[in-house]
Amino acid sequence: MAVVPSSGLSPGGASAYDRWQTMVQSTKQGMPSGAKPIEPHVTRLQGRNLVFGAGDSLKLSMPQLDADIIDLTPADPLNMDDRASWQLNIRGAEVMLTDGQITTFLRAQLGDSAKAVQNLQIRFLPDNKLEVTGKATKLHIGFTVKADIRLDDKKRMALVPTSIKFGILSLLPLAKTFNLNIEKLAKFSDKQGRFGITGNNFWIDPAHLSDSPKIVGTVSQVRSQQGFLSIYMGKADAVHPLWLPHAGNYATLTGGHLITGGQIIKNPEILLRDKTANDPFNMDDEPGRTTTVVHGEVTLPQAKLNAIIDSAVGDGDTFQVKKFSMTEKGAKINGTLKGFLPVEIYLRFARSKDGMLKIEPHGGKLSFIPIPGGLLRSIIGGMLKGSTKEGDGFVVGPDMLGSTQLGQLISVTNTNGALELKI
C-alpha cells in the first residue's frame, strides 16, 4: 500500500493515500481536555500563484509568497479558517493587482462618497503609469487623471499626477497659479490608513489593504504593466525571484500548532496542491486542493472521528451507528443490526504494517450476548467501506477518508478522548 515518504515534502503527494474527510467548521469544541498552547505560535507559509480573499471587496493574487503566520489567539491552536485571528508577516512577496480589482476595492471603500462619481475606472499602464477616469455625478462632467506610480518616503504607493483634466480644464496649472493642492480641495482618506491624499499625491498603502488577515510588511518596489500592477514586499523584487522549494501552484505550512481540515496538527509540514493547475491557486476553495500532512503530530478529536465513522458507515441498512464515543483504550460504537437488534462494539486504533491507520474490533455484544470474533470482524468489515483486512483489523480505505492525505504513521495513540497520530 503506497504512502508518502516520511522525509521531505513530496512535490506532488501522488503516492499518498487519501485520508480524512474535509471539515469546514472549526473543531475547537472537539479539542481533547488538557490541551495546552504551544510556543511559538508561528507557522511559515510559502507558495506560488496563490489567490485568497482579503476582506469583502478584494482578492489578493500572489505569484510568490514567503511569510510567517502569527497567531493572535495564543490560548488556542491557530485556526486557519478564522483569518481575523492571525496576521501575515511578509518575508518576501509579489502581490499582483488588476485594473478591475483595485477599481472594485476603491468603489467599495468609498461607500456613500462613491455616489459623487460615476463610472470610476482605474487603468494600469506600462512604465509605472496609471490613468483614472470618471464623471462627477452632480455636474455631469467627466474627468481624467494621469499619474506616475512611485514609492513615497513611508513606503506607500504614491500616485503623482502629471495631468488632471476636469472637462476641458487642466487643473494642475490652475492649482499652481493659486497655490492650491488636491489635499486642500478634497478630503479623501479612510480611518484604517489604507489610502489618502498628501499634497497633490494620492497614496495607497499595500500593507494595509487587507484586514482579514492583517498584512505586515514593507513595500520594496512597484512595477506596472498594461492592466496590472506588481507590488514587491520584503526581500522580493522584479529581478530576483524568491527561492521556493516547489514548482507549480502550491503552498506549504511549516511549524507551529494549527487547526486545518478538522484536525489539530502540532509541528507540521503540510503541502497544499492545486487541482486546477492552469489557473491560480484559490486558497478559499477547499475542494479544489489536496492536502498532504508529511510530518507532524495530528490530533483527531472525537467530533472528527465521529464524522469519519459516519462517512464510513454511510446509509447502509445492515448496520447503523447510533452513538460513537471515545474510551480509555479506543472507542465504542452503539448501533443497530438489521434495523432493530441493539449492538455494542469496542474498537482499538493501531498502525498497519505499511504505516496506515488500522481499526481493530476487540469485543462486542448483540443485546446482552457476546459477539463471536468472526461475526464481529464481519460486521466491522462490512461497515468500513473500502477497508482492507489485515490480521484481526481493517486498514481504512480511500473511500472513507476524503481529500486530506497523511504521510507514513510512526505511532497511533489514544489520549484524553482523542486519537493522536505521529507522522
Image: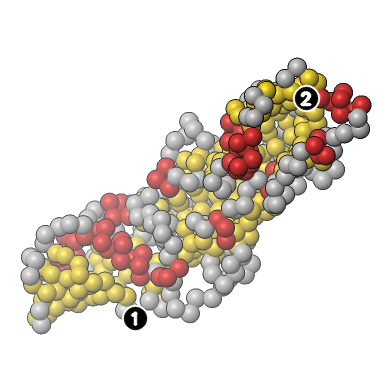
| Vertical arrangement, residue 255 with respect to residue 399, above or below | below
Q: Please say if 212 is above or below 375.
A: above
Packing grade of label 2 (10 A; few <14, some 14-19, many >=20) is some
- How crowded is the residue under tag 1: few (<14 C-alpha within 10 Å), some, or many (20+)? few
Q: Is residue 355 left or right of residue 221?
A: left
Q: Give the residue drawn at x 47%, y 58%.
A: 260
Where does label 1 land, which residue? Answer: 328
Tell me what residue is drawn at x 42 percent, y 42 percent: 288
Q: Secondary structure at mark 1?
A: loop
For residue 354, side relative to residue 162 (left or right): left
Mark toward the viewer: 2 or 1 = 2
Where does label 2 land, which residue?
A: 164
Horizontal relation, residue 167 to residue 295: left or right: right
Residue 304's quadrant in the figure?
bottom left
Which residue is pictured at 58% across the width and 53% down the height?
A: 212
Measuring from the top left, give residue 254's x and y in whole percent: 58, 56
Residue 365 picture quarter: bottom left
Percent of width and height locating residue 283:
50, 45
